[in-house]
Image (spheres, helix red, strand yellow):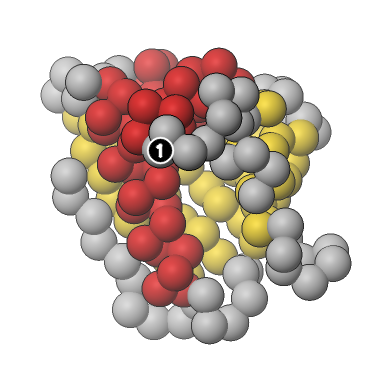
Amino acid sequence: MNSADSLKGITIHQEVNFSVSPQRLYEALLSSKQFSDCTKKSFPNFTAKSANIDSMVGGTFSVFDGHIIGRILELVPNQRIVEAWRVVDWPEGVYSIARFDLKTQGSGTKLIFDHVGFPQGLKEHLAIGWTQHYWEALTKYFQ
């Protein structure tokens, strides 16, 4: 897995290669069942139904047993997902923007991920969380 993090500002920029098609990755990120299965496989302490994702523009989502919540702002099938994303213990009404761009790379997918607008002081914690709870978990799930 190749992951690079932006060093300036409060932006997380990560690029990760997956050995599956953009369609398969897109579907896993938007499917309550697949995301729950992925989470359960990597983190047995989460419930089998740890994700509830209404996979349409304007739809809401809750993942990791309700710890992360938000709304889907934009969908370009098999290419882009943009979410208003927050941790439930952030101050009321504070949302960040998480953008997932999927690019075909050989027989796999290059995910270009950008996360902006989160509360100050959380960059390192969130960057580690994206790597461990999303990218590493998805990589295991696809194996």
Q: Is mark 1 on a helix, strand or loop?
A: loop
Considering only vertical position in the picture, is 14 above or below 40?
below
Q: Where is residue 6 in the image (x, y as percent from the top left)?
A: 34, 71
Q: What residue type is labelled 1?
A: Phe
Considering only vertical position in the picture, is 131 above or below 27?
below
* Residue located at (42% from left, 57% from top): 129
Image quarter of residue 71: top right
* Residue located at (29% from left, 41% from top): 136
Q: Position of residue 100 (x, y in %)?
A: 47, 42
Q: Position of residue 117 (x, y in %)?
A: 62, 69
15 left or right, relative to 94: left
Considering only vertical position in the picture, is 4 above or below 73?
below
Q: Is residue 104 visible?
A: no
According to the picture, the residue beneath numbered tag 1 turns out to be: 43
Q: Where is residue 114 in the image (x, y as percent from the top left)?
A: 46, 56
Seen from the viewer's position, the closer of residues 7 and 105 is 7
* Residue located at (41% from left, 46% from top): 133
